[in-house]
Image: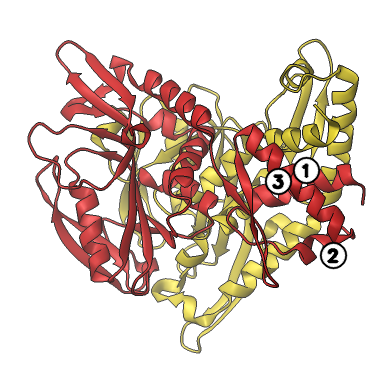
Chain colours: A yellow, B red
């Protein structure tokens, strides 16, 4: 196969298989080319990916080695994306009772969701995540987007058990915003002990829901390796119960009376 | 920029922007190259994409023209993927009460979900879909996967209204399997009249849920342009109430007593 054709095919293959070790013999077989040509191709691709700000190829040496595509957003790409998102969210028409923000339209756009996933995957690229966990329903698209870039499975915590889940483990927790006792449920065989879990959710106020997920994961002796929320907002009634998280956006100065709101970059961009 | 570098960058750009018209001047500007070079690049990419069985570039002529990447799975790719999936699902340990099948592990794998999305997007590539609709919660990842390949937004029908949705329209319907009256809810400003909707869901027995979605969409005077379900199974108690759908998998001969089940290709592969 010609170099030009190989570059197209390999670029597609690598993009479709992020965080996955691909052996050089795989490429030499599939594209019927010499190892030296493939190595050279990978060098060109690696350099271009970095210049495009979409990630890099990591070389794993040795007999069981190969290359891995690590999707990484450049700082400029991440910042301009988040600033644009903040701009859209600052529209006062989005204000809902209780200081919530209408975001369904933005979370309904697959491109936006994939960009959010790419951003979290960049941040957690080196955290050895085994699985992404979210709670139904708004966090689901975000969790899949992150997981598809990290190449790990998704497990969904439910509010109610379903027949299609088999036997389940459940806990009760106090929701920060409604102050009601709520239930969370996970299928019994969701994780083995010591699994490294990344929690992803769309919105956090006091953090009651995320705290609930942490308690549920404790029941499985899973390890919370990271927490990522799209947007965090202050809760006037309750102090935050979660502190080790990253947010893409921070919502502040919510003034329902005067229809004003501030949305800016979250703590992922600080320091 | 050199051809080799352009091919990598353009391949990435096109894959990340399916079903989106990209003008030639965009490419000549970004990659600082002559129109003739870009045209030649696109020819090479188009040919390679088709040979890889991942889709093709559609050329739109005229001043407002350009190219569009249409993701299309080759028949062989689709069939081998679905046969593998059927194989995994035929495991009798997956049988659940009521003739349901445990699929959470497969639907938790982002690669599998993206492949399912690619398959539906191939089938509905020419159907002028404006939006993908699903019902919470199992259909959500599939809906996003399809929508990301078709480059259209997702709207999620809920079982219960949420404060973060604003005002809503709701209908009641009879579920085929539980024969209970259930509710479905959509935000009031979800669609404008005449919107072409693709309904996506994970599982269909009698089709009560999908029929409910159709009734709800009628309230918005939206047009159901297609229905896709991952798996369909016979319902012994009720006749099917939906007929104009495509399925990737058909489940039959469910024998809970003897722990047997047949899973084969769905009607999308017939005729």
Provide the residue designation for mark 2: B29
Label 1 neighbourhood size at 10 Å, few (<14), some (14-19), many (20+)?
many
The reply to whether label 1 and label 2 mark residues of one chain is no
Report how far apart the C-alphas of labels 1 and 2 lie in the structure: 22 Å
Q: Residue under circle 3? A: A123
Q: Quadrant of the N terminus of chain A?
A: top right
Label 3 sits on a secondary structure element that is: helix
- Would you say B203 lies left or right of A93 here? left
Viewer-nearest of labels 2 and 3? Answer: 2
Q: Label 1: which residue?
A: A55
Percent position of residue B264, x then y: 32, 23
Alpha carbon distance from label 1 to label 3: 12 Å
- Residue at the extreme front: B61
| Mark 2 crowd level (few <14, some 14–19, many ≥20, 10 Å Cα) | few
- Residue positioned 46% across, 53% down in the render: B126
Count of number-bearing discs: 3
| Residue B138 in view here | yes
* SS class, disc 2: helix
Q: Are marks 2 and 3 in contact (CB under 8 Å)?
A: no
Whether labels 1 and 3 share one chain? yes
Chain that bears disc 3: A
The image shows residue A239 at horizontal and vertical percentages of 51, 61
């Amino acid at each position: 196969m010609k170099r030009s054709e190989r570059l197209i095919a390999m670029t597609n293959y690598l993009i479709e298989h992020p965080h996955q070790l691909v052996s050089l013999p795989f490429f030499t077989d599939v594209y019927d080319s010499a190892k030296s040509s493939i190595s050279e191709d990978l060098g060109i691709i690696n350099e271009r990916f970095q210049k495009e700000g979409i990630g890099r190829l990591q070389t794993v040496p040795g007999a069981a080695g190969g290359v891995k595509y690590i999707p990484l957003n450049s700082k400029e790409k991440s910042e301009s994306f988040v600033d644009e998102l903040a701009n859209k969210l600052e529209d006062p028409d989005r204000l809902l009772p209780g200081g919530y923000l209408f975001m369904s339209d933005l979370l309904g756009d697959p491109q936006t969701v994939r960009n959010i996933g790419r951003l979290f995957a960049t941040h957690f690229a080196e955290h050895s995540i085994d699985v992404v966990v979210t709670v139904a329903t708004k966090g689901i698209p975000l969790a899949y987007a992150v997981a598809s870039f990290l190449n790990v499975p998704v497990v969904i915590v439910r509010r109610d058990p379903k027949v299609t889940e088999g036997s389940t483990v459940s806990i009760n927790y106090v929701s920060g915003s409604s102050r009601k006792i709520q239930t969370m449920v996970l299928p019994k065989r969701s994780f083995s002990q010591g699994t490294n879990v990344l929690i992803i959710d769309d919105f956090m106020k006091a953090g009651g829901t995320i705290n609930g997920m942490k308690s549920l994961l404790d029941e499985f002796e899973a390890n919370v390796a990271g927490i990522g929320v799209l947007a965090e907002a202050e809760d006037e009634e309750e102090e935050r119960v979660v502190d080790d998280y990253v947010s893409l956006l921070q919502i502040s100065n919510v003034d329902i009376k005067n229809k004003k709101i501030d949305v800016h970059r979250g703590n992922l961009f600080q320091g």
